[in-house]
Image: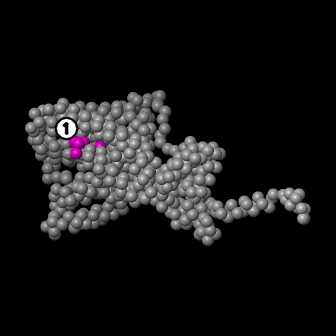
Amino acid sequence: MLALLTEDTFALTAVVLAVAAVVGFFAIRARQPLIVAFILVGILVGPSVLGWVTEAEPLKLMAEIGIAILLFLVGLKLDIHLVRTTGKVALITGLGQVFFTSVVGFGLALLLGMSATTALYVAVALTFSSTIIIVKLLSDKRELDELHGRIALGFLIVQDIVVVMAMIAITATSGDRDGALWSEIGIVLVQGVGLLLGMAVLMKWVLPRVLHLVATSQELMIVAAVGWAISVAAFSDWLGFSIEVGAFLAGFALASTPFRESIASSLTGLRDFLLLFFFIELGAQLDLSAIGAQVPAAIVLSLFVLIGNPIIVLVIMGLMGYPKRVSFLAGLAVAQISEFSLILIALARQYDHVDNDTVGLVTLVGMITIGLSTYMIIYSQWIFERLAKPLSIFERSRLLTFDEHIGSAAEVIVYGYGRFGKRLVEQLSANGHHVMVVDWDPHSTLRVTEIAEPDKVELVFGDADDTEFPSSLPLQQARWVVSTIPRVDANRVLAQSLRRWGFTGGIAVTAHSNSDASLLGADCRSGSIDLVLQPFTDAADDAIRYLMSRPRSTEESTPGS
């Protein structure tokens, strides 16, 4: 069987997916995070146990695509307001944490008996946290748009930039490069500036027009978005940056377009499926044979990462005036080491800067911190409630004021911008209400600008049949969601999705016939829908009332006149 699996990539993938499904099932039943379960699947099918996946090559391509899509979706969520509000704290906290972990980690490694060179590499490896894992966990908890999620994302990006520079330094000072470090860094800086300028040009003059052309077909727009993300990621990788940096920039380039929420919701399922291969590949790369003697040192270093890194974030953010809750929740994002840490230490081994024992040590620290920090983030609110009192020492008496969540001011969300929807939006906005329009017609942008109060109307592109899309809407602020789409199935799916995502306001739907209204009436009685609108019937009733209430003129009342 082993020979068959190593020769047949399709069969190997099928078996790995089957094993992942079984392990994932038991993990869910045991209320354990799937990330940990999938890493365990990688260890199980990897060279340390069953040996089905030796070099993880069959899974690598799908894992890389999954990483690219994940970071692409992160970039989609990164608007200019986030950069303005969290850029300073992200930079200071990110660099402060890198400096603290490197210095203290270096001293700790020396105390554990390592040489200066080995201690330096171990300290640097402990510095970086996993952007991929943290973003996945915060996205699942719907905390990526909250203040602590935005700050965490910011300093994780700072870390990613630092790790790229660290790997450049290793390669530039090793091999046949003759230590041309500054030359290498200069080339990378020039390439980076060129990449950013090119993206700025595309964002300004090219991408908005292209998206309007492809948005006429939902399938075409999704294919175009994925193609764009993978292409920019590949180009970034070719320039010497990581796939993650390119995919993130590809998403950021589309973040200011009205299509971003629709693209994001459509790619959520694909992202989750492909990331499965990343976690399995990560587990398959772990060599258990090299970590047996490293357990004591690994426990010490893991405790340092799990406790020390969040504490330095608490200190820095506390000094900047952030409340303890925000600082604590953001600090948990650095309570593990990154897959980049494993890559960096493997690169150091390639140049004989460290030995296999060091690689095994960092691998074990990765297993411990990734596993435990996953639980820490999942149960972060519960942990904070029990540590709130002692954490007060990290909080200043005068705190900053800020918005906990970036959200729309929309009071009413209207699905559909046809004749009925347009009239509703016109009347609501004219009466001073903020309205969000959800529509799949790319030409709706032009028609929204024609109404009397366009500044009170926000347009996003989405589909009522997309059950994931409501998660991106400002449901906490909205009082009503109104569907002007006259399809019973679409309205039922929309109502169920809204309730599933926690919407407690009113839901009004549209029916064009009495039979459809009767079918939706059952949903009203069950409580999932609050109101059924019948525009044709209502318009006819209003017309009759108007006609019958209008007095006849004298000429009309006089026979023969």
Residue sitting nearer the eye, 11 or 299: 11
Q: Is residue 384 above or below residue 31?
A: above
Q: Is residue 175 left or right of residue 523?
A: left
Residue 298 shows up from this direction: no
Q: Amino acid under label 1? A: Ile
Residue sitting nearer the eye, 95 or 489: 489
Quadrant for residue 333, please give it.
top left
Residue, x 21% and y 35% (percent of image)?
187
Mark 1 surroundings: few (<14), some (14-19) or many (≥20) residues within 10 A: some
Q: Is residue 408 left or right of residue 251?
A: right
Residue, x 29% and y 43% (percent of image)?
245
Residue sitting nearer the eye, 126 or 340: 340
Residue named by callout 1: 168
Q: How many marks?
A: 1
Residue 540 shows up from this direction: yes
Q: Is residue 228 above or below residue 387?
A: below
Q: Which residues are magenta?
A: 238-245
Q: Is residue 234 left or right of residue 500?
A: left
Rendered location of residue 509, percent (x, y): 58, 60
Rendered location of residue 82, percent (x, y): 42, 39
Q: Is residue 289 above or below residue 559?
A: above
For mark 1, give the secondary structure. Answer: helix
Residue, x 55% and y 50% (percent of image)?
447
Rendered location of residue 44, percent (x, y): 21, 60
Residue, x 22% and y 66% (percent of image)?
10
